[in-house]
Image (spheres, rainbow, N blue to C red):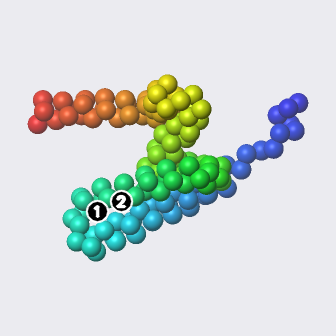
Amino acid sequence: MVDQTKPKPTVVKNCIWAFVVGGLICTLGQVIMNFFSARGLSQVDAGSATAVVLVFLAALFTGLGWYDVLGKRAGAGSIVPITGFANAIVASAMEFKREGYIFGVGARIFSVAGPTLVFGFVVAVVIGLIKVVFG
């Protein structure tokens, strides 16, 4: 009965919005990277600086409440880029701030993004070992 009355998800529309918003975030990243490259930074340094700027902007927008509005509209388009990782960390910190800076923010800041960090670290170690062993 409930399945008959609940609205059907608009999968195609959601996918298009995710694609557009994710593409716009990546386009912004490319514009920032081109800016740093034009100022004389190497490709590697410009990429690092771009990541820092995107993470800072995502953290700022999360703190202002804007990133949540974007996330509700864009879905995975705002979660998949590096900005989504920054959003996860800052949102966790904001949620547990009322419990104090040590036992709230410090203890639980990585509660959402922590498994991602651990998985990334383990995969990097495994790939590094494979490269060392097999050349």
Disc 2 vs disc 1: Cβ atoms closer than 8 Å? yes
Q: Residue at x 24, y 59 (%)?
A: 45
The residue identified by callout 1 is 46
How many numbered callouts?
2
**CA separation in Å, label 2 and label 1:** 6 Å
Question: Which amino acid lies under the numbered mark 2 shown in the image of this protein?
Answer: Thr
* In-image side of 98 versus 106 (left or right): right
The residue identified by callout 2 is 50
Label 1's element?
helix
Question: Which amino acid lies under the numbered mark 1 shown in the image of this protein?
Answer: Ala
User: In the rendered image, is residue 74 in sight?
Assistant: no
Is 105 placed above or below 83 here? Answer: above
Q: Position of residue 2 (x, y in %)?
A: 85, 32
User: In the rendered image, is residue 65 in sight?
Assistant: yes
**Quarter of the image holding residue 117?**
top left
**Quarter of the image holding residue 122?**
top left
* In-image side of 65 versus 2 (left or right): left
Q: Alpha-carbon neighbours of circle 1 within 10 Å: few (<14), some, or many (≥20)? A: many
